[in-house]
């Protein structure tokens, strides 16, 4: 029997068409992946299915019967639960309270919370998920972001949903955490649950899904069994054109040393880090969660300075204590948390893109608004930031376009010689990834030094001239393209094999 069927769903917001015509169906006990570029209609579709948004036309069938979902409560009554990418948890109460909010068990009187039962039940859900080490009694705010994501998923499982919608559930999870989650998703499907899985990570789609639906420009353009598709076919359906290659050619030619750090250390984060990045060179940095990659980048940029060691730019010894120090010396950093660190979400694209370029767009301390509009509009057109119009609040943009705003902000700063990209394509679609890869390659060809930090191994392998591997706060290997072997890199990052003397970084 078909568990869920969507027929000709459409939704517009004034003149903006968010969903034009989406149709698909999926049976019980199946995992259906939904993928597409940012702006393809995934988020709007998910809100319609969860009852948060009403469609303008079309119909939804559950167990082959038409249903109306005018409110989230109606979707819940039909057994639909949605885990959004944005967390909706309360940091100052316990894990169990977050999971059971609104349904805490009580004693026989019905007036007193049965805390023992609440913690037992929450612990069982977490254990079934493969995360029994999380204590239900702990404050939610004491957990890591990855653990909080698990709690968000566990909260949805409390009511034993028939249809579970997961939106980018692994964006902040490690590889081992992702595999534990996938193990439980497979168990849920085997028990007859229907899973809708939204992800930009194509390798996950081929790992977890039975079928895939591709959305493009608000329309469903493909539904096929995963085992009948290649990754190339899936990407081409998403971007609507043939692919010659995902990664641009390495046409850059490394020149003089731009960045040189020696014996950089910060207690509890990283120890004795030494590396160089040359003009026109892309140096990749790979490591597992907690390896210290981001912390090294923060030290170079001055947001969390090192305690010992030296930083040189263009041969000059510098004392970088704040991001402003770094910017003054030609350093830009695209942070891994664009919403927390890179953007002012409730202000306009114009304000965000011009945020770091005050000296360029002002004269004698007075803002030249005409020049600001001219430069920002040109950069928005160059990076194809959508929807057009720089007066729009950044919060209204898709994740990929928000990331373009962050990059545009730093591209507008003059005389930047070192770019640090920390997870530059996290949570963006494949088409936007390819655009960002092209930006990085073009910067390198212009002689800019690039330090590229990514947890996506194909990304660093496809772009880098050299690759540095971090493990537990130490730089453990430096590899050139002839040594770019995934199994070798993973073994270094996990400490599973000895490192030859030629590859150790002293």
Image: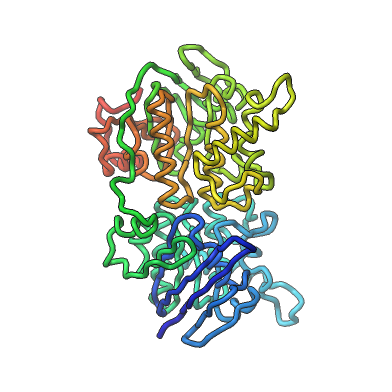
Residue at 53% x, 66% y is 19
Residue 354 locus on image (x, y percent)? 63, 34
Residue at 62% x, 79% y is 74
Quadrant of the rendered image containing residue 92:
bottom right
Residue 69 locus on image (x, y percent)? 60, 78
Residue 300 locus on image (x, y percent)? 52, 26
Residue 312 locus on image (x, y percent)? 48, 16
The answer to whether residue 107 is above or below residue 293 is below
Quadrant of the rendered image containing residue 358:
top right
Left or right relative to 288: residue 346: right
Residue at 64% x, 51% y is 141
Residue at 53% x, 25% y is 331
Specify the farthest residue to the top. 316
Specify the farthest residue to the bottom. 65
Left or right relative to 319: residue 108: right
Left or right relative to 338: residue 251: left
Q: Name the quadrant of the N terminus.
A: bottom left
The answer to whether residue 165 is above or below residue 85 is below
Q: In this rendered view, identify the residue nearer to me: 205 or 359.
A: 359
Q: Name the quadrant of the C terminus.
A: top left
The answer to whether any part of residue 257 appears in the image is: yes
Indicate how the structure is coloured in the image. rainbow
The answer to whether any part of residue 122 appears in the image is: no
């Amino acid at each position: 029997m078909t568990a869920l069927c969507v027929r000709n769903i459409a939704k517009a917001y004034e003149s903006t068409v968010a969903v034009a015509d989406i149709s698909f169906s999926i049976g019980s006990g199946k995992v259906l992946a939904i993928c597409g570029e940012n702006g393809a209609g995934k988020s709007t579709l998910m809100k319609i299915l969860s009852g948060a948004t009403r469609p303008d036309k079309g119909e939804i069938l559950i167990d082959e019967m038409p249903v109306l979902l005018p409110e989230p409560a109606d979707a819940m009554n039909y057994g639909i639960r949605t885990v959004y990418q944005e967390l909706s948890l309360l940091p100052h109460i316990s894990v169990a309270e977050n999971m059971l909010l609104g349904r805490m068990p009580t004693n026989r009187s019905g007036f007193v919370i049965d805390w023992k039962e609440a913690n037992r039940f929450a612990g069982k859900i977490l254990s079934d998920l493969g995360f029994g080490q999380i204590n239900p009694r702990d404050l939610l705010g004491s957990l890591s972001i990855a653990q909080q994501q698990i709690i968000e998923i566990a909260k949805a499982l409390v009511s034993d949903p028939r249809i579970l919608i997961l939106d980018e559930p692994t964006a902040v999870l490690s590889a081992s955490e992702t595999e534990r989650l996938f193990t439980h998703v497979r168990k849920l499907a085997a028990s007859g649950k229907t899973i809708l899985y939204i992800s930009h990570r194509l390798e996950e789609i081929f790992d977890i899904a039975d079928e895939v639906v591709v959305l493009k420009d608000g329309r469903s353009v493909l539904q096929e069994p995963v085992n009948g598709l290649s990754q190339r076919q899936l990407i081409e359906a998403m971007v609507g054109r043939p692919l010659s290659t995902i990664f641009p050619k390495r046409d850059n030619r490394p020149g003089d040393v731009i960045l040189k750090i020696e014996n950089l250390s910060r207690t509890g984060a990283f120890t004795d880090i030494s590396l160089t990045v040359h003009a026109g060179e892309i140096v990749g940095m790979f490591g597992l969660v907690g390896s210290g990659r981001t912390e090294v980048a923060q030290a170079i940029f001055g947001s969390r300075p090192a305690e010992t060691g030296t930083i040189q730019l263009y041969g000059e010894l510098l004392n970088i204590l704040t991001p402003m120090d770094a910017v003054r010396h030609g350093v830009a950093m695209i942070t891994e948390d664009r919403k927390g660190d890179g953007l002012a979400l409730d202000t306009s694209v114009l304000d965000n893109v011009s945020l770091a370029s005050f000296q360029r767009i002002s004269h004698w301390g007075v803002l030249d608004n005409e020049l600001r509009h001219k430069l920002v509009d040109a950069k928005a057109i160059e990076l194809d930031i959508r929807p057009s119009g720089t007066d729009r609040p950044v919060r209204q943009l898709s994740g990929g376009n928000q990331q373009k705003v962050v990059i545009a902000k730093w591209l507008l700063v003059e005389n930047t010689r070192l770019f640090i990209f920390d997870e530059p394509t996290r949570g963006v679609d494949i088409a936007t990834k390819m655009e960002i890869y092209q930006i990085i390659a073009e910067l390198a060809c212009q002689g800019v030094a690039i330090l590229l930090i990514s947890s996506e191994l194909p990304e660093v392998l496809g772009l880098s001239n050299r690759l540095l591997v971090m493990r537990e706060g130490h730089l453990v290997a430096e590899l050139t393209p002839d040594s770019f072997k995934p199994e070798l890199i993973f073994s270094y990052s996990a400490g599973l094999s000895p490192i030859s003397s030629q590859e150790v970084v002293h």
